[in-house]
């Protein structure tokens, strides 16, 4: 995947030190195949949402085939599309004015 995101189920996060630089190994399953193979992504600590726990639904952001961030997903947001998703865009309905009904 060149650019996009993917939903997953977090299995484990493990810190790893390579020549003194800390990284995180994030182990996850595809949300559509929870009993399938466990996949792993290695990312820097700044790319991982704090407070993730095994069993959490996560979103992995990709760029040029590499994971660039891991964030928690809501229970209702199981969107597994590979589009660039920066979050929902919603209109503020309170700021909309009602039509003038002069007759």
Image: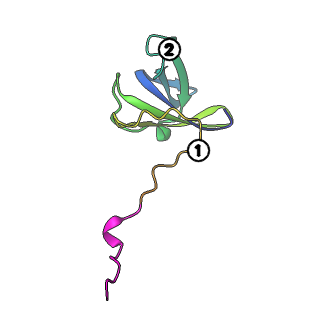
Q: Is residue 71 visible?
A: yes
Give residue 38's position: percent from left, percent from top: 50, 14
Question: Which quarter of the image is occupied by the N terminus?
Answer: top right
Q: Is residue 20 visible?
A: no
Spot occupied by residue 70 in the image (x, y as percentages of width and height): 47, 35
Question: Which quadrant does the C terminus fall into?
Answer: bottom left
Residue that carries the numbered disc 1 in the rendered image: 84
Q: Quadrant of residue 58?
A: top left
Q: Nearer the viewer, residue 90 or 73?
A: 90
Q: Name the mark on residue 52.
A: none
Residue 93 lies in the magenta stretch: yes
26 or 61, which is in the foreground? Answer: 61
Horizontal side, residue 11 vs residue 84: left or right: left
Q: Earlier in the sequence, mark 1 or mark 2?
A: 2
Q: Which residues are magenta?
A: 91-103
Q: Identify the secondary structure beneath mark 1.
A: loop
Residue wearing tag 2: 38
CA neighbours of label 1 inside 10 A, class few (<14), some (14 to 19), many (20+): few
Eyeballing the image, is 29 above or below 86?
A: above
36 shown above or below 27: above
Q: Is residue 95 left or right of residue 21?
A: left
Foreground residue among 90 and 19: 90
User: At which x and y percent is residue 64?
Assistant: 69, 36
């Amino acid at each position: 995947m060149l650019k996009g995101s993917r939903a997953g189920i977090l299995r484990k996060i493990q810190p790893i030190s390579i020549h003194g630089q800390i990284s995180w190994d994030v182990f996850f399953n595809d949300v559509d195949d929870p009993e399938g193979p466990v996949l792993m992504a290695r990312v820097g600590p700044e790319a991982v949402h704090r407070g993730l726990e095994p069993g959490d639904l996560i979103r992995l952001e990709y760029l040029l085939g590499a994971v660039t961030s891991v964030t928690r997903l809501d229970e209702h947001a199981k969107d597994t599309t590979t589009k660039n998703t920066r979050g929902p865009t919603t209109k503020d309905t309170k700021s909309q004015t009602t039509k003038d009904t002069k007759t």
